[in-house]
Image: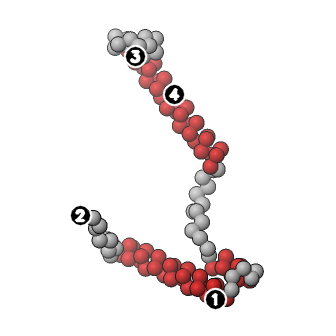
């Protein structure tokens, strides 16, 4: 089937097969470069920093000092953060020991 006789590889000509493979490799590399360039341009460079996971105790202290939250709100939020941190530490310790309990299967 000769759709584009000058570009596609011809079974009888080994040089056209090599040319078609090189053309395909160049197109793939150009596409990869374009994707990387667009990602950096529109989403910023990937500096390896972990995304923000929410409030820290320092953030809460700043809010409390500035008067944006009351003492009661500060203490409730602080307890929630500390409890979440303790659960994460327990989960990580269990995973390190290999004693991770799998959640029950849901569904039929």
The percent position of residue 69, horizontal first and vertical second, equals: 69, 82
The mark closer to the camera, 2 or 3, is 2
Disc 1 secondary structure class: helix
Residue 11 lies, with reference to residue 104, above or below; the image says: above
Indicate which disc, 2 or 3, sits on the residue closer to the N terminus: 3
Q: Which one is in front, 37 or 16? A: 37
What mark, if any, has residue 9 been given in the picture?
A: 3
- Spatial distance from mark 4 to mark 1, Cα to Cα? 63 Å
Residue for badge 1:
72
Indicate which disc, 4 or 2, sits on the residue closer to the N terminus: 4
Indicate which disc, 4 or 1, sits on the residue closer to the N terminus: 4
The percent position of residue 97, horizontal first and vertical second, equals: 36, 75
The residue at the point 68 percent across, 86 percent down is: 70
What mark, if any, has residue 108 been given in the picture?
A: 2
Residue for badge 4:
26
- Spatial distance from mark 2 to mark 1, Cα to Cα? 45 Å
- Spatial distance from mark 1 to mark 3, Cα to Cα? 75 Å
Q: Which one is in front, 78 or 23? A: 78
Q: Dot 3: within a 10 Å radius of its alpha carbon, few (fewer than 14), some, or many (20 or more) residues?
A: some
């Amino acid at each position: 089937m000769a759709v584009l006789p000058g570009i596609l590889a011809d079974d009888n000509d080994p040089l056209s097969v090599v040319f078609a493979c090189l053309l395909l490799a160049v197109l793939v590399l150009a596409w990869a470069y374009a994707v990387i360039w667009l990602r950096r341009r529109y989403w910023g460079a990937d500096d390896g920093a972990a995304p923000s996971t929410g409030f820290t105790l320092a953030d809460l202290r700043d809010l409390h000092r500035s008067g944006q939250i009351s003492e009661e709100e500060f203490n409730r939020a602080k307890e929630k953060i500390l409890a979440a941190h303790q659960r994460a530490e327990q989960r990580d310790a269990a995973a390190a020991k290999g004693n991770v309990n799998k959640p029950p299967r849901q569904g039929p």
